[in-house]
Image: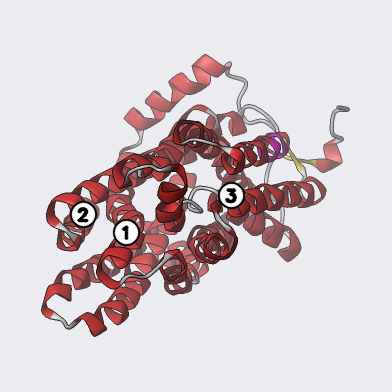
Amino acid sequence: MPAPSLSTVVSAPRAAPAPSLVLAMAAGAGFSVASLYYSQPMLGLIAQDLAAGERAVGLVPTLTQLGYALGILLLAPLGDRFDRRNLILLKSVLLALALGAAAVAGQLPGLLVASLLVGLMATLAQDIVPAAAVLAPDAQRGQVVGRVMTGLLLGILLSRVVSGVVAEAWGWRVQFGLAALSVLAMGAVMARALPHFAATSTLRYPALLGSLLALWREQPQLRRAVASQSLLAVGFSAFWSTLALMLHARLGLGSAAAGAFGIAGAAGALAAPVAGRFADRLGSPAVARLAIAVALVGFALLLVDSWLPAVALLPLLVVSALLFDFGFQSALVAHQTLVYGLVPPARSRLNALLFTGMFIGMAGGGALGSLALAQWGWHGVAWLATICAGGSLLIRLR
């Protein structure tokens, strides 16, 4: 591949990126990260088709989240070392192949391996978001990152709606196949839309990874942001990972109903650009504190379900999802805006540390949520989410 000309290489922001470019990045982030969540509303169908138990099939989203965390830690820092555009295009192809492997898996072990690979390659979303931070002027970084994060968060939430409906109508394998095609299509769009990016580091790969530890030690604001967002992610993932099983057991509802709850959560994705603008004006810590408080209220509402009639359960879940999704997403944008401003040449590595911690929390939330549901029922999941959100707020208030 010929070297890009200097006129097409981005090394520092000059003006706000064109709206069409921001839209392309938002869509690319959304379609890639959606791959992490397609399986959640389909777990019942997958378990039935592959003759697997609930606990065994629960490893599908858990391994996907763990793969994502590992990919962020091991692959996302490469964005500081190489052209982000090339990394994004390569990962698009590999993610599509992993999704295709999930679609044709004949037994649960094969699906688990494919799920791990999906998580690893879906980290292309974490190459797109730092790219947006590089393209944006300093005074508009929160706003631009917030718009791209709107696409990413809509991908997270609407993926459940789409997969629930598609899986119920045509089967879970069709959903994975369509996901592979969507990632290839977005890869083609990104190939045309993205400029080339100049590397900001010359470190070799071992030293690049080693610098993560130095950044962690030297940046207390980074450590607080990671700890706070990770605890919030435990509650977020515990809810979404167990919702389908709870709705099926208590109300006899299928995967489409579970996926439809993503519509309620998607409304919260509109908070991302708003949170970004307020983070630019008021400061990221203040926005993060307010956002976490909103999420805490949303989780705490789940605790009253045992005192309400069954007919009130669905409205309660919708209101709760609106609140905690709004809070979770706003807190994430605020923490990203804060972290990206700490050491600009290391944005990919800072992003890697933030999202590694968050998705470890996601994976832990999925596992702990399944355990809480099995041992203490839905009330146990509600207590888990509320306690974790309270801990997240305490960290930010210190």
Q: Based on the displayed image, in which of its 4 quarters is residue 211 positioned?
A: top left
Dot placed on the residue nearer the N-terminal end, 3 or 2: 3
Classify 188 as above or below 377. above
Three-letter code, disc 3 = Arg
How far apart are labels 3 and 2 at the CA level?
Answer: 27 Å
Q: Position of residue 202 (x, y in %)?
A: 62, 21
What's the magenta bit mostly, secondary-structure-wise? Answer: helix
Asked whether 249 falls inside the magenta stretch, the response is no
Q: Which region shows up in magenta? A: 88-93
Whether residue 224 is visible to the viewer of this picture, yes or no, is no
Where does the N terminus fall, quadrant-wise?
top right
Q: Based on the displayed image, in which of its 4 quarters is residue 252 positioned?
A: bottom left
Name the residue at 69% across, 53% down: 182
Name the residue at 24% across, 83% down: 312
Residue neighbourhood size for the residue with mark 3, other residues' Cα within 10 Å, grouped as few (<14), some (14–19), many (≥20):
many
Residue located beneath label 1 in the image = 245
Horizontal relation, residue 32 to residue 18: left or right: left
Callout 3: SS: helix
The answer to which of 358 and 289 lies nearer the viewer is: 358
| Mark linked to residue 284 | none
Residue located beneath label 2 in the image = 373
| Mark linked to residue 173 | 3
Whether residue 51 is visible to the viewer of this picture, yes or no, is yes
Three-letter code, disc 2 = Leu
Classify 130 as above or below 393. above
Mark 1 and mark 2 in contact (Cβ < 8 Å)?
yes
The answer to which of 9 and 314 lies nearer the viewer is: 314
How far apart are labels 1 and 3 at the CA level?
Answer: 20 Å
